[in-house]
Structures are given as C-alpha cells and as structure tokens.
Amino acid sequence: MELIGTITPDRPLLVLALAEEAAHLDGGLPVLLTGMGKVNAAAALAAVLAGGPHPAEVLNLGTAGALRPGLAGRTHRIAEVRQHDLDGRVLFELTGRPTGEPLSLAADGLTLATGDLFVSDPAARDRLAAEAHLVDMEGYALAAAARRAGVPIRLVKHVSDEAGEGAVKAWRESVDDCARALAEWLAADRA
C-alpha cells in the first residue's frame, strides 16, 4: 500500500492497484496504490478511510479483462459489481444471511465481476460472461470498503485484454496505453 498526496474532504481519492496503472496521472489528486487482489484492496482502502478525513469520493481507476466481444480498448463506467469467487448461495444456506451480494453503483454502465483470479482460461471467461461484461481483481472489495465507511465510490475500468488465452501477455503489452487512457478519462471527467 502506498498513499501519494493528502486526502481532503473536497477532492476525490484515486485508488488503483498498481503503479503501472497510475503512470500517466498528473499528480493533482491523492492516489492510493493498494496492490493486487481483494484483500490488498479492501485492507488498504479501509485503513486509509479509518485513519483520517474522508475524501469527497473514492474513484477506482484500473484495468479489466473483457468477458464479451466489442469491449476491448475502451474505458467503461461500472454500474454493478459482483464477486465471482464467492458462492453467496451456500453461505446463505449456512447462515440465513445474505453474503457478498452484488453492489449497484450507478444507473448506467457495465457489470464487473471481481475475484482473486487473473482470468486467462477461456472456459472461466465464458462462465463469467453469463453474468458480467468485465473482470478485475479489486473492484468489489473497494466498493464494499467504501460503502462501509459511508464514502461514495465510482469504478472506471479500461479494458486491457480479452480475458482468456494470452491475457497475461496482452495486459503487460497494453498496461501503459491503458494508464494513458485512464488519465485522459480522468482529465475529461474533471473538466
């Protein structure tokens, strides 16, 4: 975890997993680099939100894999985020309480599936595509942590790869272009 800048109640906090995804940000806003995966993301954001003033909002920028055709190379706002590696139905049967339910974030946008698995298997991609458009490793955890702290959150993802065979290589080759696209999206959003 690395916090760059100072959080104030009048500005958003930018939250990204990796420095590579933040490479082209202009430095005008505070940035939290959480590390990859749900545990790193939730722990880092929860620690920052518990330790000081809350930002105006949390803005999660990052890369994602496309689960469906036609989404690659574009930046997308997330309307709903769900966990793909937690079987809430079984947990409900055990406890009688909902666990890990999908979270609605915006009126329009795509559905993001979050899990601690870099999806590079075509069968996994096809299974996930039935319920989501994109896949990442941090979004749900960040949305849950922000909600618990009472801080608004937006998730914006740039598609780095077609989740499936070759996804790791594609991510490595495209992450700098994705970082540039995310910085451009942020500049337009802030204008």
Image (cartoon, rainbow, N blue to C red):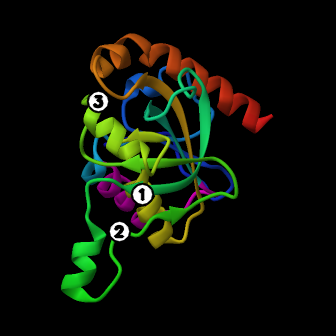
Front in this rendered view, residue 43 or 26: 43
Question: For the N terminus, which image quadrant?
Answer: top left
Could you say where residue 179 lies in the image, as x and y percent from the top left?
Answer: 51, 22
Q: Secondary structure at mark 2?
A: loop
Left or right: where 88 falls relative to 14: left
Residue visible at 43% across and 35% down in the picture: 67
Residue visible at 35% across and 80% down in the picture: 98
User: Mark 3 vs mark 1: which is more N-terminal?
Assistant: 1
Label 2 and label 3: CA atoms lie apart by 25 Å
Q: Is residue 53 something that shows in the picture?
A: no
Label 2 near label 1: C-beta < 8 Å? yes
Label 1 and label 2: CA atoms lie apart by 8 Å
Residue at the extreme right of the image, as rendered: 191
Q: Check disc 1 and give the amino acid type.
A: Arg
Q: Which mark is residue 122?
A: 3
Q: How many marks?
A: 3
Q: Which mark is residue 28?
A: none
Q: Residue 184 sits in which quadrant?
A: top right
Q: Which mark is residue 82?
A: 1
Query: Start and end of the magenta stretch?
Result: 41-57
Could you say where residue 120 lies in the image, as x and y percent from the top left?
Answer: 27, 28
Q: Which mark is residue 100?
A: 2
User: Mark 2 vs mark 3: which is more N-terminal?
Assistant: 2
Q: Secondary structure at mark 1?
A: strand
Residue at the extreme top of the image, as rendered: 173
Residue at the extreme bottom of the image, as rendered: 96
Could you say where residue 55 lies in the image, as x and y percent from the top left?
Answer: 58, 57
Q: Check disc 2 and give the amino acid type.
A: Gly
Q: Nearer the viewer, mark 2 or mark 3?
A: 3
Q: Secondary structure at mark 3?
A: helix
Q: Is residue 152 above or below residue 183?
A: below
Label 3 and label 1: CA atoms lie apart by 20 Å
